[in-house]
Structure formats: structure tokens, C-alpha cells
Image: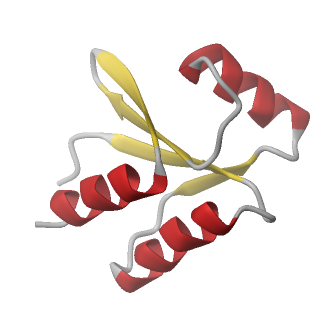
């Protein structure tokens, strides 16, 4: 049972986003992907995470949320969360 909800903010033209998406496929993880080309998603990313940089993984837990930037950090978190 997953104790948190994951949302990946991404952009189709971003090679670092593609790196994270490949790992999601490899791990067979199905999480929500929000494209920042949609203005509402970009605004939510800036409001929550403080910057428009992608990829960004939003980790929602019952009492807090964490905004994780940097593709390698996101990949490490994803790999650890499946174990």
C-alpha cells in the first residue's frame, strides 16, 4: 500500500523528464503526469515548488507535501519507493 501520492511535472521537450519517464516505465509505475505546457499545471508547479523547473516530483503525504527537483534525485526516490 502506497503511503503517498506522486505527481510528476514534466515537459515534452525536456531530456531530463524523458530520463525519469523511462525509469517509471522500467519500474512499471503508473503515476499522474502533469505537462507544464498547460498553464494551470505550470502555475501550480511554481506556486507549490517555487520554480518552474522540470522534472519535478510532487510527493503528497497526509500531513505534508514535498517538491523534489533534479532527475537523478527523482529517480533515486522512485527506485527506493518500489522496494
Which residue corresponds to the image point at 81% horizontal and 64% vertical from the top-left? 13
Q: Position of residue 26 (x, y in %)?
A: 38, 84
Q: On screen, 79 above or below 42?
A: below
Q: On screen, 63 above or below 12?
A: above
For residue 68, what is the image quadrant? top left
Between 42 and 76, the one nearer to me in the picture: 76
Q: How many marks?
A: 0
Between 34 and 79, the one nearer to me in the picture: 79
Q: Position of residue 79 (x, y in %)?
A: 24, 66
Q: On screen, 5 above or below 52?
A: below
Q: Position of residue 21 (x, y in %)?
A: 54, 71
- Please state if 5 lies on the left or on the right of 13 as rendered: left
Q: Position of residue 70 (x, y in %)?
A: 47, 47
Which residue corresponds to the image point at 23% horizontal and 50% vertical from the top-left? 2
Look at the image and tell me in which quarter the C terminus lies. Answer: bottom left
**Seen from this angle, which residue lies furthest bottom?**
26
- Please state if 11 lies on the left or on the right of 38 as rendered: left
**Seen from this angle, which residue lies furthest left?**
83
- State how the image is colored: secondary structure
- Please state if 33 lies on the left or on the right of 7 as rendered: right
Which residue corresponds to the image point at 17% horizontal and 54% vertical from the top-left? 1
Which residue corresponds to the image point at 67% horizontal and 68% vertical from the top-left? 15
Between 54 and 65, the one nearer to me in the picture: 54
For residue 18, what is the image quadrant? bottom right
Amino acid at each position: 500500500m502506497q503511503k503517498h501520492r506522486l505527481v510528476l511535472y514534466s515537459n515534452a521537450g525536456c531530456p531530463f523528464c524523458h530520463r525519469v519517464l523511462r525509469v517509471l516505465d522500467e519500474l512499471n509505475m503508473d503515476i499522474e503526469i502533469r505537462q507544464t505546457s498547460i498553464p494551470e499545471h505550470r502555475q501550480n508547479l511554481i506556486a507549490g515548488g517555487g520554480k518552474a523547473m522540470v522534472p519535478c516530483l510532487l510527493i503528497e503525504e497526509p500531513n505534508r507535501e514535498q517538491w523534489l527537483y533534479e532527475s537523478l534525485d527523482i529517480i533515486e526516490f522512485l527506485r527506493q519507493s518500489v522496494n
